């Protein structure tokens, strides 16, 4: 990184490179093209080469973990302090809980003036007991060390305010919310190529006679997969043409699914599991309904993506989801974890495809108006500039 550059120096940190690759694509390159020397930091991972190629910004590895690992965390904290003291950044901006805690503490200890943490969902929302109180303490510590805290949705800001996790003066939302906005040029039917559609159809043994429910996200309890699989088996009893497509990785280490749910996914011929795909727009194109039963989110990109693709949405009533979808106007919303409500909404959606399509069109208009990627980036750039000047 040039030492005599007139540009301001910006360090962006996530715990793992997967977040840089899939939550923030294009953002670092945009900031680098608009007056910032950008350095990215994360642990090592298989997405790293892609990240460096796509963003065209330098990257440093700090081996952070997503679990609670006190000794490793201290080593990473020390390493970050050394980096900040050498690099002397104007802004340190963190995402994800562990990167937020270590990055904000290290930046404060190193005298970095502008310390921003983006909150894109809170793991504590799905916890109870000791772990809940520990996570509350960690969030408070992170926000205390930050100079600016950016929740990525209004409902998340409300939660943080109600729980008194942060001084209200530090809180700010970029544009109308979202971490990275939506790439409208990618997520629309006109952008898809026929070969891609054909390949995805082959992958799921597609038939025009069948109805496809789609869910995208990590296959863990937190994402509501247990309820979704159970409700699907109930719907299946009265509908032989119904299929469920699950796109996402199993996580054995963090919040794994119970054995009976795993077995159902593996043995039910009407459930197709796709371990990973960076072509989710093609799955959205062939699906009839998008179901998102997650227990906690900040501002879920997949809902923006499904909405931009004009795919009807049924989702849980949680922070983030309710910022994007309005019940009975732009989609259907059920109470988190409520299998009966999910079942009822899915039955309605399957019986009333025209009403669902009308809601999907409304949602598409909302997303095109409020959540375009360029708009989010420009707003963030202005916020950066006003903070460092």
Image (cartoon, rainbow, N blue to C red):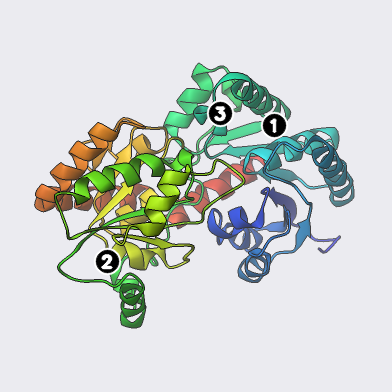
- In what element is the residue under mark 3? helix
- Tag 2 or tag 3, which sits nearer the N-term? 3
Select label 3 or label 1 by which is in front.
3
How packed mark 3 is, by other alpha carbons closer than 10 Å (few <14, some 14-19, many 20 or more), is: some
Left or right of 26, for residue 328: left
How packed mark 1 is, by other alpha carbons closer than 10 Å (few <14, some 14-19, many 20 or more), is: many
Tell me what residue is drawn at x 83 percent, y 35 percent.
Answer: 111
- Spatial CA distance of label 2 from label 1 is 43 Å
- In what element is the residue under mark 1? loop
Residue 54 versus residue 123 in the image, above or below: below
Select label 2 or label 1 by which is in front.
2
Q: Which mark is residue 124?
A: 3
Single out the residue that lies furthest toward the bottom: 195
- Spatial CA distance of label 3 from label 2 is 35 Å
Q: Is residue 389 visible?
A: no
- In what element is the residue under mark 2? helix
Q: Quadrant of residue 107?
A: top right
- Tag 1 or tag 3, which sits nearer the N-term? 3
Q: Which mark is residue 311?
A: none
Q: Are marks 3 and 1 in contact (CB under 8 Å)?
A: no
- Spatial CA distance of label 3 from label 1 is 19 Å
Q: Quadrant of residue 7?
A: bottom right
Tell me what residue is drawn at x 40 percent, y 67 percent.
Answer: 186
Residue matched to label 2: 286
Q: Are marks 3 and 2 in contact (CB under 8 Å)?
A: no
Q: Position of residue 205 (x, y in %)?
A: 29, 73
Q: In the depicted view, which residue is nearer to us: 379 or 85?
A: 85
Q: Which mark is residue 146?
A: 1
- Tag 1 or tag 2, which sits nearer the N-term? 1
Q: Position of residue 355 (x, y in %)?
A: 11, 48
């Amino acid at each position: 990184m040039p030492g005599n550059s007139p540009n301001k120096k910006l360090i962006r940190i996530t715990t793992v490179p997967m977040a840089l690759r899939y939550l923030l694509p294009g953002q670092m390159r945009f900031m680098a093209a608009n007056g910032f020397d950008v350095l990215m930091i994360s642990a090592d991972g298989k997405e790293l080469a892609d990240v460096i190629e796509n963003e065209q910004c330098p990257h440093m590895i700090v081996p952070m973990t997503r679990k609670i690992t006190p000794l490793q965390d201290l080593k990473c904290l020390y390493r970050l302090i050394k980096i900040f003291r050498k690099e002397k950044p104007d802004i340190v901006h963190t995402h994800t809980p562990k990167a937020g805690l270590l990055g904000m503490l290290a930046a404060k200890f190193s005298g970095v003036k502008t310390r921003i943490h983006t909150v894109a969902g809170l793991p504590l929302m799905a916890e109870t007991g000791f772990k809940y109180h520990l996570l509350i303490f960690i969030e408070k510590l992170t926000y205390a060390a930050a100079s600016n805290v950016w929740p990525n949705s209004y409902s998340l800001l409300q939660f943080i305010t109600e729980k008194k996790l942060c001084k209200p003066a530090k809180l700010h939302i970029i544009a109308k919310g979202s971490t990275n906005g939506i790439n409208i040029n990618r997520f629309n039917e006109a952008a898809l190529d026929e070969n891609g559609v054909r390949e995805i159809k082959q992958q799921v043994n597609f038939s025009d006679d069948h109805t496809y429910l789609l869910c995208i996200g990590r296959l863990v309890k937190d994402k509501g997969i247990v309820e979704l699989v159970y409700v699907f088996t109930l719907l299946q009893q009265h509908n032989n043409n119904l299929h469920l497509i699950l796109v996402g990785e199993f996580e054995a280490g963090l919040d794994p699914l119970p054995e009976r749910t795993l077995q159902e996914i593996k043995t039910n011929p009407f459930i197709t599991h796709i371990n990973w795909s960076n072509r989710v727009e093609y799955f959205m194109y062939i699906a009839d309904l998008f179901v998102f039963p997650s227990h906690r989110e900040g501002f879920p990109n997949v809902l923006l993506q499904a909405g931009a693709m004009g795919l009807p949405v049924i989702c849980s009533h949680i922070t983030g989801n309710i910022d994007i979808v309005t019940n009975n106007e732009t989609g259907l919303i059920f109470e988190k974890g409520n299998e009966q409500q999910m079942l009822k909404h899915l039955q309605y959606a399957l019986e009333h495809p025209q009403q669902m399509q009308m809601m999907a069109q409304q949602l598409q208009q909302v997303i095109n108006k409020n959540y375009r990627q360029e708009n989010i980036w420009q707003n963030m750039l202005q916020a950066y500039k006003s903070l460092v000047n």
